[in-house]
Every structure is written in structure tokens, then in C-alpha cells.
Image (cartoon, grey):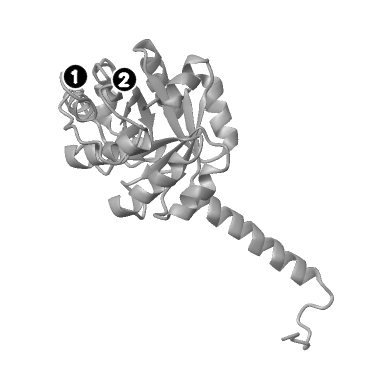
Amino acid sequence: MLENNLKRIWAAGRPVLNGWLSIGNAFTAEIMATQGYDAITIDMQHGALDYGAALPMLQVLRGYDVTPIVRVPWREPGIIMKALDAGAQGIICPMVNSAAEAAEFVSYTKYPPLGQRSFGPTRATIAYNGYGLEANVEVLAFAMIETQDGVENLEAIAATPGLAGIYIGPSDLALGTQKGRLAPGFDREEPEMIDLIQHILAVCHANGLRACLHCGTPDYAARAIGWGFDMTTVSGDTRLLAAAASASVGRWRELVRASPAAGGTNSGY
């Protein structure tokens, strides 16, 4: 029976911590799944992976107490339905610019009469020991607001029946609304960007939606939770790997430079 734990966490009044996977590898997914995240998103839009890699990653995540989400490449029914049939419990859709696009996206995640999703949850029915029309309630649809059109149509998008929440990607939001004046990046400090992010948050809550924000650091994510965000993503596998490797290499070089024996002729091999 499909049950989405994020709905239970939010019903209990707690925020959600989301992890992010951009490396198409089941072992990487397993490593992240053991770290204590509430949800983990597989990034099929910008991640180095396709459906063939995403499927075993979803299989791995099923073995842990973590809700699997997929960010699809686009608002295209085939990949959205295929990701859900593979076991995703939530879909993040990029570049939603209007109420019509939001409604179209939601329709791909719902079975009739609420939408136009085709029934054939091949892997999902095995993974969840049965899978039926309860998916209309348990599957979560998140629209990304990333453009000026999306911001201008925000209230109408937020009023879309069946939409679970709005997911903010700060990089594209800055590029799409600031006319190239601001560089892409997470953890925005510009007053106009903070105002915009908090405006999206307020519109979400006014419409009963969950507000979600992609962050670069746990400090900024905790700050966003303090603003009222319901879910924050903190970094992701590629950035975490790079940061840990960089710190390790930097520390080694620091210690070796400080060692009196550094540069000795005894190779030890």
C-alpha cells in the first residue's frame, strides 16, 4: 500500500529535510539514504543520469525510511508517468510558467477522473505491495517557479487543484527574474531575492501549499525553516563529495607543508 511519509511529517507539524542525487549510481543513492534524510530527490533534469540509472536508485531508496522524489527533465507526460510507475512518490517539475501549465503537470500525476495518468505501475505495485487509486492522494506534485512569467502568474499557479507545493530553485529564479543582473547561486542574500522568496512562501501558505527551497548550506536551510518553509534541500551528492574531498586534500597539504620531513628523499615504496 502506497503511503507517503512526507504527508505524515507535515501533518505532525515538522519540516522535511530533502537530499539530492545528481550522480547516476545506486551505491551513491544508498550512501545518501543512510544519512537520515526525510526525502531524497533524484535529479533527472540536470543530473548525470537517465531512466536506466534512476530505476535502480529508486529500488535502493525503497529499502530505507526515505521518501523518493524525482525531478523530471520537463513537463512531459511520458517521463512523469514512467518515474511514478518506477516508484517515485513525488515529482518536481521545472519551469512552470502559468496556471495552464501547472494544471497540465498535475494531470500527468493523477489517475482519472482527477487527471490523465495511464495505469501501469509495473515496479511501483511490487515496491509498495499494491498500488491503486490511493496514488491520487499520496503522490505529491511540486511545480518549480523559476521565471518572470512564473512569478507574475504565481497566485493562479498556486490555486491549481491537486498541486502539493512549489519548489524554488534560487539559481534559475535569479536568472529568470533579475534580467541577468544577478549570477546564479543558492543561499541568496540580496534583499530583492529574499523578498521574492518570502513572497512565494506566503502565496504557497495562503493557498494551502507546501513551500520548498533548494539551499546550499544547513545554516541557510535552517534560516528558511525559520521563515516558514516546509521542506529544504541542503546541497547534494556532487557538492558534498567535492567539498569533503577538497577539505581532505587541503588538510593533507597543510600538514605535509608543516612537517619537517616534507620533501625527504626516502620514498618508502
**Residue 195 visible somewhere in the drawing:** no
Q: Quadrant of the N terminus?
A: top left
Q: Residue at x 37, y 50 (%)?
A: 56
Disc 2/disc 1 C-alpha distance (Å): 10 Å
Q: Report which residue position mark 1 lands on.
A: 114
Determine whether, in the image, residue 208 is placed left or right of residue 39: left
Q: What is the x, y in percent for residue 54?
A: 34, 49
Q: Residue at x 26, y 15 (%)?
A: 159
Q: Please tell me in which quadrant of the rendered image residue 166 appears.
A: top left
Amino acid type shown at disc 1: Leu
Tell me which label, 2 or 1, sits earlier in the chain: 1
Q: Residues within 10 Å of mark 1 (few under 14, many from 20)?
A: some
Number of numbered markers:
2
Amino acid type shown at disc 2: Val
Q: Residue at x 53, y 24 (%)?
A: 225
Determine whether, in the image, residue 112 is placed left or right of residue 237: left
Q: Report which residue position mark 2 lands on.
A: 137
**Residue farthest toward the top in the current orientation of the protein:** 206
